[in-house]
Image (cartoon, grey):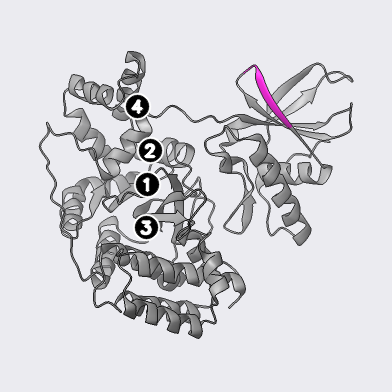
Amino acid sequence: MTNQQRIATGRIISDMIKADNIIEEREISEMKSLMMQYNITDEHMKCARGIRFSEAVNELTGVSGLTRKEREQLFNDIHKLSLSDKACVQKEALLLLALKYCLVDVDGYKVRGANGRLVKPKLVECPATESALADPYIVYVESSYDQVRNEEISSQFKLMVATAKLYGINFIYIPELVKEFMSMRRQYITDVIRFMDPGLSEGFIQDIYDRLSSMTTASFFKEVLYDRLNVKVDADIPPSLLINIGTSVVPYCVTEGPVQYYTEYLCLPLYAETMQVVEDVLRTYCSCVSVQFTQVTNDNIGHFRYFGFYKALFDYLIAPPPVEPDIIFAGRNVRDNRHELIFRYGKSMEKKIQVTPQAYNLYLEIAMSGKGGASKNERVVISRLRSKITEALTDVTYSAKYMPEKVCNRYKLLIDKSKLFERRYTDHQQKAYEDLPLRTKGGAIHS
């Protein structure tokens, strides 16, 4: 194991111990045994506080991650740890579910995305405002409409819901959720929205209602998960199940400093008929959990559910739109010979940062088509670039979208491509210009 892999393993061990909010002597004894087995030091455990559970798992499953035999051994060891107190509760079982698909079952995956590449189970996350425990749920997601999958789910929706409820898990299908809300009186829904935030204007309340009534599986993925919540999934994922596995706290066990919360999900591409995959997930979960929680829900039409997935969705709907400036690649400034990146807020406000030609060209390449395995020098440049962007975008809700991120072994920008522009000057003094959409495939890098 590398040092990073030991840190990652330390995070997984720690999360499993803390999952039931009780730390028993047998768990500490088992932890010390695992630390010795994997040569994990106290320093590794200290560093593990600063990474998310999803980061840890993805570190172990990447190209330079553990071998299949090592991953299987680790899963068995973590499973044993979860049972060291003679019980595996819901939170522990959800973590084991994620580990089972990402560490053990990942090698057998044959699902391919729109571009023909293999798409495998992975853990993704999005920032959360608190560590409140949400009811577990499974939600169907897709980046574009898949008629076969939607017809399949529609025909078996009630069975999927009933089956999942047996294990205390909600199955969410956006068209059925919309249908549920649209069966309620419009005035009732708008009154509830106004109750949630009395400061909302009448026009905005009506806009929320309209967005809810027209939401589809694809628009939910694009507008809610990808654009608004910044869930780090590929923009063109095939039909998949998104399963919330809990909240990751970074850092944990600290006496000072800000704490960040992340809701984490297992993103599971559908490898068979949807009902079969749902049953496989529940069967795996059931094989882990030893303390069952059966959720009781009220399906009366006149009852507005404001918890779990429903609360998360409405918190998004009533929240103001996040600040998301455009990125403009302005090239070399003739006055000081420095390359400029401009973040444009509407028509009247711009923030500029100056970078080296190397950083500019690398950022542009990543924005246009992505960047494969970056060299050591390029990684240093990317790190410095991220620092500059962070300093500039202190008022941007999801500034991570503007950072080069490593996704499936390529550096990419998670910002929507429609927000990328290049500035073309029409005079030598660079006083007149036009901003044109950036060509995201091919094309020369201007300087």
Magenta highlight range: 347-352
Residue matched to label 2: 220
The numbered mark, 3 or 1, whose residue comes first in the sequence reads 1
| CB within 8 Å, label 4 to label 3 | no
Residue matched to label 1: 141
Residue matched to label 3: 270
The numbered mark, 1 or 2, whose residue comes first in the sequence reads 1
| CB within 8 Å, label 3 to label 2 | no
The numbered mark, 1 or 4, whose residue comes first in the sequence reads 1
Q: Tag 4: Cα neighbours inside 10 Å, few (<14), some, or many (≥20)?
A: some
Q: Nearer the viewer, mark 4 or mark 3?
A: 4
Q: Nearer the viewer, mark 3 or mark 2?
A: 2
- As drawn, 220 above or below 375: above
Q: Separation of disc 3 and disc 1 at Cα? A: 10 Å
The image position of residue 115, as x and y in percent, is 54, 52
| CB within 8 Å, label 1 to label 2 | yes
Residue sitting nearer the eye, 195 or 222: 195
Residue sitting nearer the eye, 87 or 187: 87
